[in-house]
Amino acid sequence: MGNEASSQGLAYGERLQNDASVEWKPSGQPSPFPAREGHCACGVGGKLVVFGGVLEGVQESNGMISYDVEKGTWSSVQVKGQLPCPRSAATMSAVGTKLYLFGGLSHDVGWLDDLFVLDTDTWTWKEVTDTQGPAPSPRDKVASATVGNKVYFFGGFGPKDGFDTEESTMSEDEEEEEDVGQGAKFTWYDDLYIFDTETNTWENPEPIKLGAPTPRAAHALCAVGKKLVVFGGRDREARKNDLYVLDTETMKWQQCKAAGQQPEPRSFHTATAVGHRVVITGGRGLQDQHFADFNIFDTKTKEWLQPAVHGAKPAPRGMHTATVVADQFVLFGGSSDVDPETMQCQKRYTDLFCVRTEEVLSGKSIQVTVEENKENAPSTAAPPQDNPSQPPKAPTCPDQPRKPRSSSWEEGEVPGMV
């Protein structure tokens, strides 16, 4: 089964030939729990831990389930303490064995700006209220990632300062389609917040804005070393397929241009760090179509790769989760089939699929030599030489292997920046 990297036939760069290959495998045990979208998930202790999301209709959940990747079994997670209210489109990141949950949307409450921590050693929730520093405003579709003991939050969508978060709530899809009038009350964010989990301190630094992403929501964010990688999402204008990197040491944003075929513009997708590579999968496109593609951004070679995809391929979807758990890349849940009248997704998923992380890290682009190009090109007569007594010039690098590009990603430089 191939990789549907450009389902609409749009040109977003030339696809690089490569020998990468991944195989999807479904969960050993079908999930006994309801299908869901807009949930959160993290990998802890060899298990995928899932929180909340929208189940049937607009029913939001604050329940928790887990999947053991080694045993291939599902189980319900019994938690205690101060439970977060049911919500969707929140964000959750792991710091060691603790999970930090922020924000989201509740149809009963509105947009949320609360912060909770779940200790997975005791499965106890606690609302984090004894904080210092400026905290984010209420929002959903915000993204977060962990670097060391700090959780970084970027973007999102919500009410402007001073607007009642309970006055108006919209569905995940309606939020993307609101008109300029609604836009006067609601806004997309491009701010960055950092929560230090050791000191319980919020920080709202002023990163260098040159090369920064536009305000957006339903984007995807992950951490590779000390760099944050942001891909796509929706801003006021449209869905995006741009790629940005924030150096958390210098606090400089830069837009990244990479060789190969860039994934199509999308929102409600996932970006997952697998070693030095970032996997972009799923999401909703410009025509409200959903994707089932598998795209790899290699931070060492600065290339986009679309591997050959085999196995039981997941259906196109968005609002899913994709998480590294032990040695597996795990995709779970989500939704698809947008109704053009209601802008609601008609189908939700409860299935789970895995790809071995070893496969994600294997394979590379293949250089096509001059001689190979000649074999594939139409036959044409060679042009006459000005000086027949001199031998023709040798091609620049017909049979030489590609010189490896130096990798400075981990050393502080950001690759492929413009």
Image (cartoon, rainbow, N blue to C red):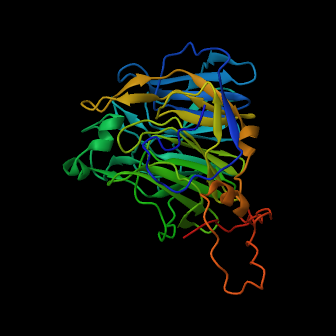
Q: Quadrant of the C terminus?
A: bottom right
- Residue 206 higher or lower than 164, as above or below: below
Q: Nearer the viewer, residue 366 or 411?
A: 366
Query: Residue 234: x, y in percent?
Result: 39, 49
Query: Residue 65: x, y in percent?
Result: 59, 21
- Residue 355 higher or lower than 154, as above or below: above
Q: Residue at x 43, y 38 (%)?
A: 104
Q: Residue at x 79, y 62 (%)?
A: 401
Horizontally, residue 1 falls left or right of residue 58, namely right
Q: Quadrant of the N terminus?
A: top right
Query: Residue 189: x, y in percent?
Result: 40, 54
Q: Is residue 82 visible?
A: no
Residue found at the far left of this picture? 181
Residue found at the far top of this picture? 32
Query: Residue 285: x, y in percent?
Result: 41, 42
Horizontally, residue 365 falls left or right of residue 63, namely right
Quarter of the image where one finds residue 178: top left
Q: Is residue 168 visible?
A: yes
Q: Residue at x 49, y 57 (%)?
A: 192
Q: How many marks?
A: 0
Q: Nearer the viewer, residue 228 or 370?
A: 370
Q: Residue at x 70, y 63 (%)?
A: 370
Quarter of the image where one finds residue 361: top right
